[in-house]
Image: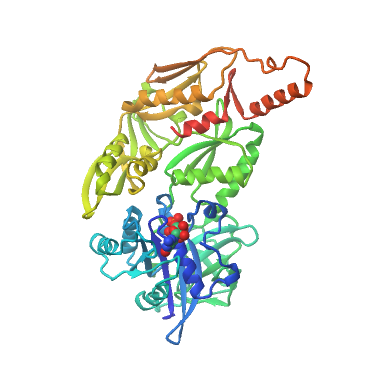
Amino acid sequence: MKNIRNFCIIAHIDHGKSTLADRLLELTNTVPKRLMQEQILDSMDLERERGITIRSKTIRMEYSYNNENYVLNLIDTPGHVDFTYEVLRIINACEGALLVVDATQGVEAQTLANATLAQRAGLVIIPVINKIDLQNANIEMTKKQIKEFLNIQMEPLLVSAKTGQGVEDVLKSIISLIPPPQINYDTNDLSCLVFDAYYDPFKYVVMYIKVLSGKVRKDYTFKFLSQDDGKIYNVENLGYIKLNLTPTEELVPGEVGFIVAGIKDIHTIKIGDLIVTPNIDTSKIKKPYVKEIKPYVFASIYPLNPKDYEDLKIALQKLHLTDYSLSFKPVSSKVLGGGFHCGFLGSLHMDIVKERLEREYNLDIILTLPNVEYKVITKDKKEIVVTTPTDFPDYGEVLEVYEPITKTTVITPLEFLNNVIETCKLFRAEVLEQNFVDENRVIITFEIPLAEIIVNFFDAIKSVSKGYASFDYEQIGYKKSDLVKLEVLVNNEVVDSFCYITHKDKAYNTAVKILEKLKKTIPRHLFTIPLQVKAQGRIIAREDIPALKKDVLAKCYGGDVTRKRKLLEKQKEGKKRMKQIGSVEIPKETFIELLKL
Ligand SMILES: Nc1nc2c(ncn2[C@@H]2O[C@H](COP(=O)(O)OP(=O)(O)OP(=O)(O)O)[C@@H](O)[C@H]2O)c(=O)[nH]1
Ligand SMILES: [Mg+2]
């Protein structure tokens, strides 16, 4: 047990965590050469395609050093802000962390956020400066930021995860600096931390655990500490997490491994929970802190073709099995029919779910504008939680509205400071604090409504800083705000799925933008289509789509039947991707354009 090291790799997005993991896996011969590929732990198709890590990945390595055999459990984590939860849930399974910093970028917002998480959890942090092979690597600057700004005094290791330079020292430091797991020897009662779980169609739920005390063997029974239903489970299978799951006889204290216990529904498991001997004396155990995953961003998904409703439902159920942070419930829209109201961790997560539905399940879907969770106090003093504009009460009934607020930190080179602050103000930001990271970099803390962060904020910050600024946010509570619901009318009919909640000061501009998008994408019809936006009971903006007499065959005088048929076919094809709203046909493109609002 003294030869076990459990550690994670944390960093800002793209600083080279998964690439460093590759080199460690190679050095320890964990992955055979013929199977090796770049960022091998990024095993999901989407991860490979987008070149980012979405889920944390655990893998066991074995390594001989100074005539001793060591077991090193590595956990690679994602760097994107939407997936901070992935870092949170694995951090308690580790005693140490490699904090990777890209030498060409320096310390960025997620470097700070993840380093803080690791520090709070009491992990030993080994700073690693990566990408030293690149010409524009600025090692001295990066060292200084790590030392002075992050307050990590250990001399950083210098590596290139690409060429492998310095990586052997990383292995040695893991062994010499990270302590072995601390174990409670007072008891032989089983207790294990569950830090990950996924659904496998053959094995059912596979739990990743770290043994805190006692031993796990086949046929041992256990219960979940946080569950009071008295349900007892049986260990059917257990083992190590190598490139493939590898069965073993037993798992001992300090070890990381997997357990299968015939659990069919992944949602019976709370990540962060303990599994314990059924008759354990619970007074002796410290109940773990289980942070529930909570969706922050909400949008509705509808099948373009109502016939696909059941398929969409099955697809969401399947996704839900593997992606426990996705929530969904049925909704119905007057114009779009049956669909599902879904909760996501952030806009990247939303994007990924949409893409998976389209690609893996071959569904043609419509996604509505994303929302956050508002609290509305009505004039009769009732509190209503609203995650979709449809549920937003009529303005006559609204007394107060509260919206979620974030603490957002932006780290930017000094030269873009003004740009960044001015841009953030467009997103209703208030500056809370401003500090230097070093002479050339500034960290600004803002209070920004969550609703503003989830649309375009990321792109805006990147574009005004030429890509150099980075940001991180966390939700910190609710604040009273002047919000109104925009109702969009197409041909005098309210289209519920176009409605939008926005700040009063932005209502007019947003209304104009919505109408622009509608006008641009809705084709002309045989009659004039009025487009209007209504807020607080009155029309605040209007556009018309002029009438058109459209005869697709008009151009085809003469008797070419095949050409006529082709044109009609083409028009039919086009129709399939349209939504009928009253007598107006709205193409899917309109919904896609609106998402870019
Ligand atoms: N030149 C050079 N490129 C590197 C090095 N390490 C990583 N990269 C490149 O940097 C990019 C990002 O690397 P990843 O390993 O995917 O980064 P990550 O930190 O795992 O990213 P996320 O998991 O999405 O947060 C890839 O294109 C790598 O090839 C290095 O040492 N030198
Ligand atoms: Mg990665």
User: Residue 539: where, in percent of width, then height?
Assistant: 40, 16
Q: Position of residue 146 (x, y in %)?
A: 28, 63
Q: Nearer the viewer, residue 107 or 240?
A: 107
**Which one is nearer the viewer's eye here, 237 or 100?**
100
User: What colour scheme governs how the chains and residues are painted in the rendered image of this protein?
Assistant: rainbow
Q: Where in the figure is residue 250, as x and y percent of width and height? A: 55, 77
Q: Can you tell which quarter of the image residue 418 is in? A: top left
Give how far across and how far down residue 478 sits, in percent. Answer: 32, 40
Quarter of the image with the N terminus in it: bottom left
Give the image quarter of residue 235: bottom right
Residue 471 visible (yes or no): no
- Farthest front residue? 135
Quarter of the displayed picture in which ligand 1 can be seen: bottom left
Q: How many marks?
A: 0
Left or right: 318 in relation to 187: right
Quadrant where the C terminus sits is: top left
**Which residue is located at x 49 percent, y 67 percent?**
22
Q: Is residue 187 above or below residue 35?
A: below
- Taking the spot 30% from the left edge, 32% from the top edge, the residue there is 481
**In the image, farthest residue toward the bottom:** 67
| Res. 336 in view | yes
Image check: 583 left or right of 350?
right
Residue 455 shown left or right of residue 413 in the figure = right
Towards the viewer: 581 or 233: 581
Q: In the figure, is residue 463 to the left or right of 313?
A: left
